[in-house]
């Protein structure tokens, strides 16, 4: 059993980590921190966990966390960068679900997150936690910067095309739709039920923090810089991201075969039969990404559809997948439950 | 491993049985029938099961089903009563999720379901599948009539009060609210998204088929006939039943203590701390019933709140729980996943 | 044209007042206040009003408000009681959508709202703004305490039975379900989309502020004190209240006829044909209350179903209806639009 | 008063026409047809209209319809083409909300709707009912083919750019999201609440019937053929379309100014202030289209956001707007109510 701590267990990704880890066959969940809820039982905040865990929130402290072999950060950006260096020094493996270690370039981080980076020396070392694109780095990592939710859905959809040089990397479009849990559990007007229900909208069209992360990842896949137009939307559902991706074909190919080959053997990427469209509910609560590829009207625009659960493959599930790899466990350990449908 | 068949696997309860049984550690799922979908793979209808099962729908046939040790019926009423007698003769244990064997009295069945009963001789034998009220019968049963969704939520809520003689059994009220999956997957106008979303209503106030089933069960708990006013409502959510129960106190008692004692040791009934209110999402996808009891203003009306997932504790999960009991397995086998939240 | 001001126009009831008043044929909307949004145009907060009004939020000030003939308070409790006395002195008619003047007894107000009343001398004078029960008082009033949302749905449902002495007033039950806009637009965890969507729950079972208001009104209808068990629930929809009311019949009667007679000629109360169930969407955006009455199984429990839009008949629409009466206008002026469906 | 008939008043667009026309100051609604519901009162199907109309459904018949001055078709495709020729001969103006007369080319109609056109001689005459692009034709028309819902949202968004020659017409992309009412009121599995709620998906990516209609309209705006990739999505909300449009800039311009100028004076097109994003709820129940235009990162991709209510500006409201024009009424008659929010 591997002793594990979670920093910041009161938001949706923290609760989702709890849901997954209390059932993980090789995890001994020891520490759960929240400055605000310290002293309360986890199941008093999360009645769905009654009978599943006796954990109590504690104030985040290096001492208790350092006694764990792995620590997950389910915090807003700015926290992991403060605590990770000391934990790594003490031999703890760190899985950061926030954005702190995703961008290789500290200046880019500063620009998009308006926050000077507190541990820029770790940026080069941090493994980008998207196993399908970066499995070997994750296996060997001490510090994993788990990929963001939008970035996961977009990169898994574009990677086969860019790696094979099939599309023009200079004019990619990602039209992404997210459930409201993607906005987190903070008290924001736009996250109120009556602001989000029975309505939808785009947001951040002028610029969104996930753009540099996606472009950085796609550039690796393409072997050269890419240019992406990224438009996120808010959709009235709890969970789920649906990315609709557009690119110009640079050469002809059997697109479905390209995708099927690229993801053959991947436990969590499912290329649907030709002509089918993924629904986000088909991955609700599951760590899968379902993909389809189309070439409408036989033209030169390729359309990729990519569906994930933002809290699972887009956050907590991916972190557990990275954890499994980093500790040499079966990659799907604790991640085998089918989606909840409907 | 116990070989299992499912008759009628295309509705919501059938899909839920599949979700639970593909992960059940002692189940070997062999047969899945649907007259209409025969020949198709289960995962072509249910993409959420891709990679989880290779089963193909077949036409329902006694031969293939009789080769299983257990058969679940996830069919509308009227089917199980036709096939169960022969399966029982051949030594198969039958778990019926429909209403066919729930009422002890064939005349009552005929009255409420407008259908003459095809196997009235089995009504006396059938165990009523609500383990918390009837565990020993279920353990010994060949034929289990799994309790309905509303009846489960109402009986678990009233039982402690009636068994202890604390309330007047002649004027019980159950105000129940159900998610739309309770209406099944048939094409009915009222089940369309735009008919049910952002709205709610009562239905069947003049009389609902679950009334005689609930009154029959409560009469057992009370040791005498009861009189219930039962008003079901449709609420715009996928899953979940919330029953709000009202009764007149006949004598004083520490109501929370009565509930806590009654359900101590029950793996799937959770009495919340005093003052808390259960949310249906706290049992989404889980086999639990969460209960609260109140005595507003210290008056003589007791209010019980009872929340279940209609597709799990109200259908497929309860059937698996009964199956576990009937085969001497651990009662919670295959039913350990926490609720999906949010 | 009647000059009108609104105090507190940034919440859901304030926005709903705006929606109704910008189209009201006899209203000249002059003042709109919000301390926090002072200086901003109303349509910058509420894009749905672009092209409908040029109003700008101002700091609430007696001077500008006193220049209006009518002032609506769409504020939390505690504000109207501060400003109403001076406005009344200056000859302004006041329509308070908050709870400040609903309870006749200042001590009751203090108990339930934990706030000493600042203008107890006005409590006796304030007309209770539920025209169907109190039309003449409203017509003559300077100060109208518009009825709350739950209280409206419950009182309209019970009044015909209590006035006719048909039910036992000592054991009334109101099981009420509300859309999330009933909780207001403040930033509360329970109002977040991901906390409320696809789930439901009861709340405040031990005691809710609307209880004394309802009991006070029902006592008038009954001609003696009543005893009510009131259980509110939160349902995942934007708007709408569905009250399901239970009472013991004291004598026999043609219940549908009693309701039809009681509300004959009422422009906003609609008694449905026997056997029909009201849906909240049938009053979405409209000032109607739709009612049904049932006697399940011919027993002695009567069930009344009552549906309103909490923001219209439960708040802004009712206030406009009271305003129309108080100014001698047609009662339905500005309130004639049919419900939005679906 | 203008006498009006509606053919096919039982679906969502028919019900929406009823909602708008019962309040239209110059409309005398005389005939409402439905083969299936003939003999029933409209308000027995649509309780939201109780007290608003006494109309009864009748079997569709030329005689009664020909006595009206205007007839609206709210039918599936294939009906209007059968009845319109005779009605036109008798001097009735026809407003068709179906697709029958939208495509100029009968062969295109046959290809996409799999139906030979019954009145190809009328295709050249029919005015395309999108007043902002085609107002003068609509004013003079006897037969108006009201624009479809997706086509309206897409054409209003692209027109300013294409008319001004600012974008490359050969690689347009329209990523459109629709509420479920866009799928109509037929009993289809995918329209069930539990199939659509808390989930989303693309559909018809390989080809959708609205594509040729949109390309036909955009070609007029561009003055030459265009090439469009059109991907519709289903979103869990009742009403609303959000179109996110992408094009390559061909030359530089102040994009916001281009839009503001193009739609200056339009009563129903609202160009938002720079940087704002339209929400579908801001047009819920209203005939408006709200637009924003962005140039993310200052690159050469322009992004237009376009929000309408699919049942109003995308169907019934647009038909009323066309009716107003064709009869010389004020263009906004009967269409002045603000959106219902929330």
Image: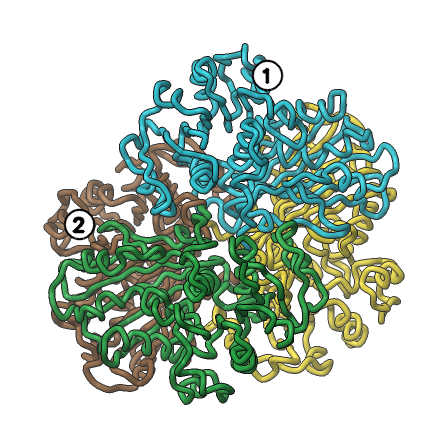
Chain colours: A yellow, B brown, C green, D cyan
**For this view, does B247 lie left or right of residue A309?**
left
Residue B41 picture location, percent across and down: 46, 36
Location of residue C170 (image quadrant): bottom left
Residue C38 vertical placement versus A253 (above, below): below
Q: Position of residue D112 (x, y in %)?
A: 56, 20
Q: Are marks 2 and 1 on the same chain?
A: no
Find out whether the residues at labels 2 and 1 contact each other: C-beta distance under 8 Å: no
Inspect this view and state whether residue B18 appears.
Answer: no
Q: Quadrant of the N terminus of chain A?
A: bottom right
Q: Is residue B244 above or below residue A234?
A: below
The chain ID associated with circle 2 is B
Q: Would you say C198 lies left or right of C227 here?
A: right
Assess disc 1: are there few (<14), some (14-19) or many (≥20) residues with their C-alpha within 10 Å of its C-alpha: some
Please give the residue where the numbered disc 1 appears in the rendered image.
Answer: D108
Q: Is residue A336 above or below residue B219?
A: above
Q: Residues within 10 Å of mark 2 (few under 14, many from 20)?
A: some
Closest to the observer, B42 or B167: B167
Residue occupying image coordinates x 55% and y 24%: D145
Query: Please, which residue is most extreme toward the top here?
Result: D121
- Measured as percent of width and height from the top left, residue C289 is found at 36, 58
Of marks 2 and 1, the one in the foreground: 1
- Say which residue appears at 40% left-offset and 70% top-offset: C129
Q: Nearer the viewer, residue C96 or D133?
A: C96
Q: Secondary structure at mark 1?
A: helix
The reply, left or right, for residue C249 in relation to residue C329 is left
Disc 2 target residue: B112
> What residue sits 14% from the left and 56% below the top?
B104
Which numbered disc covers residue A246?
Answer: none
């Amino acid at each position: 059993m591997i002793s594990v701590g979670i920093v910041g267990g009161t938001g949706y990704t923290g609760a989702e980590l709890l849901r997954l880890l209390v059932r993980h066959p090789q995890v001994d969940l020891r520490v759960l921190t929240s400055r605000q809820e310290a002293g309360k039982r986890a199941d008093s905040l999360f009645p769905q966990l009654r009978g599943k865990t006796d954990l109590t929130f504690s104030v985040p402290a290096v001492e208790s966390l350092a006694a764990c072999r792995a620590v997950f950060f389910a915090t807003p950006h700015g926290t992991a960068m403060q605590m990770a260096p000391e934990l790594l020094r003490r031999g703890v493996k760190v899985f950061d679900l926030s954005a702190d270690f995703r961008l290789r370039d500290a200046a880019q981080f500063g620009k998009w997150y308006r926050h000077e980076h507190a541990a820029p020396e770790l940026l080069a070392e941090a493994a980008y936690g998207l196993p399908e694109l970066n499995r070997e780095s994750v296996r060997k990592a001490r510090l994993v910067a788990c990929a963001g939710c939008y970035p996961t859905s977009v990169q898994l959809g574009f990677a086969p095309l860019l790696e094979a040089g099939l599309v023009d990397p200079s004019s990619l479009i990602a039209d992404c739709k997210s459930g409201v849990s993607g906005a987190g559990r903070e008290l924001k007007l736009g996250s109120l039920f009556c602001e989000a229900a029975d309505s939808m909208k785009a947001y951040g069209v002028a610029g969104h923090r996930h753009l540099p992360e996606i472009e950085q990842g796609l550039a690796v896949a393409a072997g050269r810089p890419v240019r992406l137009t990224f438009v996120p939307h808010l959709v009235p559902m709890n969970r789920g991201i649906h990315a609709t991706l557009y690119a110009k074909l640079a050469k002809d190919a059997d697109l479905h075969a390209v995708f099927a080959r690229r993801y053959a053997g991947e436990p969590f990427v499912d290329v649907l039969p030709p002509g089918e469209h993924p629904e986000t509910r088909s991955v609700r609560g599951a760590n899968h990404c379902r993909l389809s590829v189309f070439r409408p009207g036989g033209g030169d625009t390729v359309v990729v559809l990519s569906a994930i659960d933002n809290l699972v493959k887009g956050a907590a599930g991916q972190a557990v997948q990275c954890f499994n790899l980093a500790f040499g466990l079966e990659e799907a350990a604790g991640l085998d439950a089918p989606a909840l449908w409907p």
